[in-house]
Image (cartoon, helix red, strand yellow):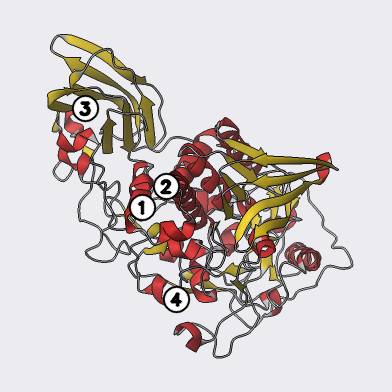
């Protein structure tokens, strides 16, 4: 093995959705970042190796938070950027193309260095401070010592944190420990199971299937609460399944991962054998369906949960408790699966309790209690088993990752440890404002950036709808979440928070910003509407994808526009964009002269009959 030692500002271990968003956020905020991941592709449970859809606060089906112009719960920031790119660049819904999108985003970031196929094997510590992460890459016979002042464990299993001696908990707490009514009467070591997914496709010949002798046989009675009763499952089970093929919750899901994988293969092939060869299914219903892909890497739901300076509980989730150190939000239901998995044929495959409102995820739940320079992001944050059952889904993990990456950058700029950052409300406010600037959403927090010149501008538009006045671009909010199942009452201001032009006036439509004293616009950011009341995620389930605007930009989004700066008779074309499909757009500028007016002219959207803009920000300095 060749040995190398490298240094940076932040080492992120784990390249799932939390790790990718954490690394990108930190790098875009000026840190030199290493992203270390033990697989050849990024994405974790969302990658082509596992193929789970990225779910989040907007939930779906009977729990869907969806009211246009009132409840727009889909996550913003980096995960929205990824979802939008995937919808536009991957109309064929290829899991491997999604891998490439994540890889491309990381490769394009100059401050970010990827270490793929690289596993954490140890940690060098000085008492309660991590000095280096020790890593091996067998594919190139290399070992690395990655040294940094700050570390983020986004590995799910918490491999770096475990090696460093960070405190953690496993299993299910009892009701009394955290005063949780949904917890068990007696604590135990049970946890959520793992799953292997499969895919099938229709073929023009009769496709036969013979199960291997080690596959587990099933009867209709065995599957009556799953294959035969899960809402919507009968519509998608042949193309993409099955999340309820679960096993391993009564085992150590780290130590017994290979055993769990072997049993999951036996289970899922047994289910497929039942579908193909039992008398319950017949004719073209199943005859022309053939397996096209079988997962061999278990999608793991739960292992270690590390102990932070705060712990998210059922009560934080269901009561939507306020946290002054919020860096993200959640909204997925309390989603508890039986630890017996598919062996528990008499139990429902999941127990879901709707979360009445979106809720805060505090920075304190991502900072190790006993390791001074360690953050967590993803499913290994500090939470009880019940609280974790809501925070664990990937879009929530992604926004936690962006929050942690941004917090790490602010800590680095201020020469602080995560603990010092956590107990300084001034710097927490800086983290929150930075997140808003980068299109993240925090419940009840609004733009208070005094250097944003739009806050002092005169604003007018060529037309506007009632409730969609031009002044809305500086409400400090970039979505509506005051509606049903949205933010707690009083924490998210009522309103559309966007300018909407009058469709009767047609295109082009214009919005003007003007100042009494000339400005020098060095940097501009715009947040467009991307229909965040709808789901938008790579899914191999046809019925779910039909609820989305997939394979194209979102219809609300402004497609063609330009920005002109004016001073007296002088005019300067600052920006000219065609075929935009992104929500957050930004430009560094070099104006030839100070301007009194910026004109934003929209000539086309991606389908909607009027223009929509949530926010415009202008600065006289680079970000």
Label 2 with label 4: CB-CB less than 8 Å: no
Disc 1: which residue: 427
Disc 3: which residue: 506
Label 1 with label 2: CB-CB less than 8 Å: yes
Label 1 with label 3: CB-CB less than 8 Å: no
Give the mark, 1 or 2, whose residue is nearer the N terminus.
Answer: 2
Frontmost residue, 318 versus 416? 416
Label 4 with label 1: CB-CB less than 8 Å: no
Badge 3: residue crowd in 10 Å (few <14, some 14–19, many ≥20): some
Give the mark, 2 or 3, whose residue is nearer the N terminus.
Answer: 2
Task: Report whether 187 appears left or right of 582.
Answer: right
For the residue labelled by badge 3, is the local secondary structure a helix, a strand or a loop? loop
Frontmost residue, 577 versus 271? 577
For the residue labelled by badge 4, is the local secondary structure a helix, a strand or a loop? helix
Disc 2: which residue: 414
Give the mark, 4 or 1, whose residue is nearer the N terminus.
Answer: 4
Badge 2: residue crowd in 10 Å (few <14, some 14–19, many ≥20): few
Task: Report whether 274 appears left or right of 114.
Answer: right
Disc 4: which residue: 314
Where does the image place residue 29, in percent across and percent down from the top left?
45, 39
For the residue labelled by badge 1, is the local secondary structure a helix, a strand or a loop? helix
Count the numbered circles shown: 4
**Viewer-nearest of discs 1 and 2:** 2
Give the mark, 1 or 3, whose residue is nearer the N terminus.
Answer: 1
Give the mark, 2 or 4, whose residue is nearer the N terminus.
Answer: 4
For the residue labelled by badge 2, is the local secondary structure a helix, a strand or a loop? loop
Considering the image in quadrants, where does the N terminus appear? top right
Where does the image place residue 416, in percent across and percent down from the top left?
45, 52
Mark linked to residue 435 = none
């Amino acid at each position: 093995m060749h040995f190398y030692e490298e240094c940076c500002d932040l080492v992120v271990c784990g390249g799932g959705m939390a790790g990718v968003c954490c690394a990108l956020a930190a790098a875009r905020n000026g840190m030199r970042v290493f992203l270390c991941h033990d697989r050849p592709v990024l994405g974790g449970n969302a990658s082509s190796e596992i193929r789970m859809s990225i779910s989040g606060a907007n939930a779906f089906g009977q729990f869907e938070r969806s009211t246009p112009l009132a409840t727009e719960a889909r996550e913003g920031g980096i995960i929205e950027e990824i979802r939008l790119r995937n919808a536009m660049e991957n109309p064929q819904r290829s899991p491997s193309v999604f891998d490439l999108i994540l890889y491309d985003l990381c490769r394009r970031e100059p401050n970010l260095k990827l270490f793929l196929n690289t596993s954490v094997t140890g940690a060098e510590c000085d008492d309660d401070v991590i000095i280096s992460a020790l890593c091996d890459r067998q594919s190139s016979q290399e070992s690395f010592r990655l040294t940094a002042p700050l570390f983020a464990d986004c590995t799910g299993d918490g491999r770096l944190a475990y090696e460093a001696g960070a405190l953690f908990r496993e299993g299910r707490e009892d009701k009394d420990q955290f005063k949780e009514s949904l917890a068990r009467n007696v604590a135990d070591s049970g946890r959520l199971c793992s799953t292997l997914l499969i895919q099938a496709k229709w073929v023009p010949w009769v496709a036969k299937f013979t199960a291997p002798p080690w596959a587990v046989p099933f009867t209709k009675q065995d599957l009556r609460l799953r294959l035969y009763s899960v809402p919507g499952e009968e519509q998608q089970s042949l193309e993409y399944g099955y999340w309820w093929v679960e096993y391993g919750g009564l085992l150590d899901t780290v130590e017994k991962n290979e055993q769990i994988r072997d049993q999951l293969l036996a289970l899922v092939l047994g289910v497929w054998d039942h579908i193909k060869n039992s008398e319950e299914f017949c004719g073209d219903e199943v005859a022309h369906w053939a397996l096209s892909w079988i997962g061999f890497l278990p999608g793991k739901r739960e292992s270690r949960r590390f102990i932070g300076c705060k712990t998210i509980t059922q009560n934080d989730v269901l009561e939507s408790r306020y946290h002054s150190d919020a860096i993200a939000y959640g909204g997925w239901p309390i989603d508890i699966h039986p630890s017996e998995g598919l062996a528990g044929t008499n139990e429902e495959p999941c127990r879901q309790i709707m979360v009445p409102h979106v809720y805060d995820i505090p920075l304190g739940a991502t900072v190790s209690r006993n390791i001074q320079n360690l953050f967590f992001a993803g499913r290994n944050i500090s939470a009880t088993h019940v609280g974790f059952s809501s925070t664990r889904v990937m879009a929530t993990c992604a926004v936690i990752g962006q929050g942690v990456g941004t917090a790490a950058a602010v800590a680095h700029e201020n020469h602080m440890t995560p603990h010092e950052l956590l107990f300084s409300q001034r710097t927490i406010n800086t983290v929150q404002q930075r997140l808003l600037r980068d299109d993240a959403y925090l419940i009840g927090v609004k733009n208070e950036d005094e250097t944003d010149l739009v806050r002092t501008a005169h604003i007018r538009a060529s037309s506007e709808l009632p409730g969609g006045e031009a002044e809305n671009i500086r409400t400090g909010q970039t979505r509506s979440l005051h509606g049903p199942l949205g933010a707690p009452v009083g924490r998210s201001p009522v309103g559309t928070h966007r300018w909407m032009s009058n469709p009767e006036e047609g295109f082009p439509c214009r919005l003007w910003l003007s100042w009494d004293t000339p400005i020098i616009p060095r940097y501009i950011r715009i947040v467009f509407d991307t229909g965040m009341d709808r789901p938008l995620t790579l899914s191999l389930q046809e019925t779910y994808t039909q609820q989305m605007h997939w394979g194209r930009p979102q219809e609300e989004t402004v497609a063609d526009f330009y920005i002109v700066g004016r001073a007296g008779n002088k005019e300067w074309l600052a920006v000219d964009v065609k075929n935009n499909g992104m929500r957050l757009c930004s430009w560094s500028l070099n104006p030839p002269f100070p301007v009194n007016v910026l004109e934003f002219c929209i000539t086309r959207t991606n389908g909607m009959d009027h223009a929509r803009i949530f926010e415009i920000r202008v600065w006289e300095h680079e970000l």
